[in-house]
Amino acid sequence: MLIALLAVAGIVYISSLNWHHSVKAVFIILVVEGALRKWVLPQASEMIYFLKDFVILGAYINYYFFSLAEKKLAFKNFTVNILISFVAIWSLFQVFNPSLGSPLVGMFGLRGYLFYIPLMWLIPSLFQSESELYKFLRSHLLLLIPVGILGIAQFFSPPSSPLNVYANNEASAVTFAGINAVRVTGTFSYISGYSVYLLVCFGLLIFFLSINQSRWWRLLSICELFLVTVNSLMTGSRGVILASVLFLICYLGVKGFTQPASTLRLLRQLLLPVIVVAIAAFIWFRPAVDAFSLRTTSNQDVSERISGSFTQPFEFIKYKELDGYGTGATHQAAPALRKVLGLPAGEFIPVGYESEMGRVALELGPIGFLLWYGLRVSIFIALWSVFWKLKSPFLRQLALSAFLIQVIQLNGQLVFHHTFSVYYWFLSSFIFLLPRLEQIENWHQKQQLLQEDVLSTYITDSPYR
């Protein structure tokens, strides 16, 4: 225990030395965390699960307590800020709900609601130009190449292969019904983490393919899109395929409505990559296409699961009325936490739950549910407003991608999905980051024009001309 505490203190301290590097490192840890848990240090799986949290904590300490000059950036959005305050107060109140059995369970559950929110105010100080943000996103997408290749290797390996293990060694690899092929997880601990990662990458790649890039980077983006597509099929997740298709349709639809003149050019830019990716997937990865098709046709419960995710919260109100079972009551790790720490059992929840909307309603009650989803709706409304106000094509299309990912994932996992939590609050920071970057770019352009004007005047008036 002492060694573990010293390791945690060391990680937090090192992370606090340079918050810029720490935050960027988090996005690498996010992708490789599962690989570390499954293959490198399975005996330290639980500690590695919290590794990025320790790094983020160190970055928070440095930024919010020691970087006073950078902290002075003003982020004004009254609706979002006030809803965050109300969510924080209500979530803290529910930590001490007697139904939990112990507030320690509530403190653990609080992490999913509040811990990653400060990233939204920290990220705008991380990037000082459009170019810097572009290079960061482009570099992050490069991780798709080894991860996607690993996913392909997993699919064509038997379920008993060392490649096809989960962070929980006792769990066996999930296979497609009727065939001896696994549903891949890449470097992630489980299928759900890989699925949301693929969706975020798909949204960013569509954005990259819609802007001007060099031939080399455009070709690389097409290769990455191919890997995202075939790996999405290999996960067997109907949700990620449906969300990706919906994203593409909405992206083109919004672009066509707001900028009809450039829509044809965008379609030409995207048409060839989409056709190439589709043909390559059908020719080289027909088993993956067939496996996903079989899973889709043999189990047609998608519409019921989607509608159920929206109706569950209203059905669950009857169990506690205006109250809930407490923050963290439905968290998958709560039983293990109670067992390890010898905590008393919480109140029995007399209903099954799977969707996040239902789980939030059970934990926070109807008041907390309305506050939490009111916050999420207010954030993507703010992103939509930013999209309309921006003039830079690069920043404008990036805002649109962030907006669509958040809208499509409204009923998806966030509180109980630490992978998407990091990406979600990173995308939410675009409310403040993108307008700031546009202001910086406009300022640089004005300074350049001013210098050119001064130089032109000097040359014209000079006696040596």
Image (cartoon, grey):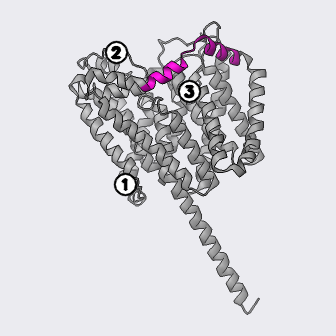
Residue nearest the observer in this picture, 121 or 37: 121
Report the mark closest to the observer, 3 or 2: 2
Element on which disc 3 rests: helix
Specify whether residue 293 is painted magenta: yes
Expressed as whole percent of the image width and height from the top left, the position of residue 283 reads: 79, 21
Query: In the rendered image, which residue does mark 2 sit on?
Result: 351
Expressed as whole percent of the image width and height from the top left, the position of residue 351 reads: 34, 15
- Does the rendering let one see residue 22? no
Who's the residue at 77% across and 45% down the image? 215
Specify whether residue 215 is painted magenta: no
Labels 2 & 1 near each other (Cβ < 8 A): no
- Does the rendering let one see residue 234? yes
Q: Residue furthest top?
A: 178
N-terminal of the pair, mark 3 or mark 2, is 3
Q: CA distance from mark 3 to mark 2?
A: 28 Å
Question: Which residue range is magenta in the image?
Answer: 288-310
N-terminal of the pair, mark 1 or mark 3, is 1
Element on which disc 1 rests: helix
The amino acid type, in three-letter code, at marker 2 is Val
Query: In the rendered image, which residue does mark 3 sit on?
Result: 194
